[in-house]
Amino acid sequence: MTSTAFTSGALPAGLFALPGVYRPQGDTHLISQALAQESLLPGADVLEIGTGTGTLALQAARRGAKVTAVDVSWRAVVTARLNALRRRLPLRLVHGDFASGLPGGRFDLVISNPPYVPAPAAGLPVRGPERAWDAGRDGRAVIDRICLHAPTLLRPGGVLLMVHSGMCGARESLGLLAAAGMDAEVTARAFVPWGPVLRSRRAWLEQQGLAATAENLEELVVIRAQYL
């Protein structure tokens, strides 16, 4: 398992993002490194859940994978499409929920940098840039659904790569994936400075026991789970 320190990065050269679309940051870089270490044969079927700018989907497409990328945000879908055209790489873009908006079929690899920031509101936002990060009071509203549906999305031997905050509980993710018949482990960790969203919620996070007083680094984890 690797452990790394990251700071937020700028948008990769040649890519752009429409207003309100999540830009690659420390979590994107961490899972990008994990993706680079995966064996990915040309023609492998890959799904990205929550594609944003399409950065990870394009990384897989550059390696010859057949990539489907899904996002609930129309702006993200348009952004990823335009970035794919600029890079001259094929992407299949789907607007909607990964669990209900995809046609049938299974994948060799599923990658996701899902919303995972704990939020005072119990439900998920239905509009605005917050859709890219707010994930219910414990930050697990989307993570839990990915863990539940992963076996239905993967072929036997297929792999899920998912990044999320340590605030959400890596053990919970590992337990859910194991219960779903998957061999799961944390393969990388990183620590990044708190961004503006966490800083704006410091008092609430401390009250909920999700952060320690004066804490200013967020732990990120990459979970790798193989469907046996």
Image: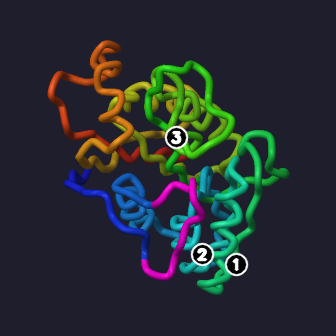
Earlier sequence position, callout 3 versus callout 1: 1
Which three-letter amino acid code belongs to the residue tagged 1?
Pro
- Residue 84 visible in the snapshot: yes
- On the image, the x and y values in percent for residue 41 come to 57, 74
Which three-letter amino acid code belongs to the residue tagged 2?
Ala
Q: Which mark is residue 61?
A: 2
Q: Do the residues bearing badges 2 and 1 touch, measured as CB atoms within 8 Å?
A: yes
Q: How is the image coloured?
A: rainbow
In terms of depth relative to the viewer, which is nearer, 4 or 21?
A: 21
Earlier sequence position, callout 2 versus callout 1: 2
Quadrant holding the C terminus: top right
Instruction: Report whether 120 appears left or right of 66.
Output: left
Query: What residue does disc 1 label?
Result: 90
Residue 107: quadrant of the picture: bottom right
In terms of depth relative to the viewer, which is nearer, 214 or 114?
A: 214
- On the image, the x and y values in percent for residue 75 come to 68, 58
Give the SS element for disc 1.
loop
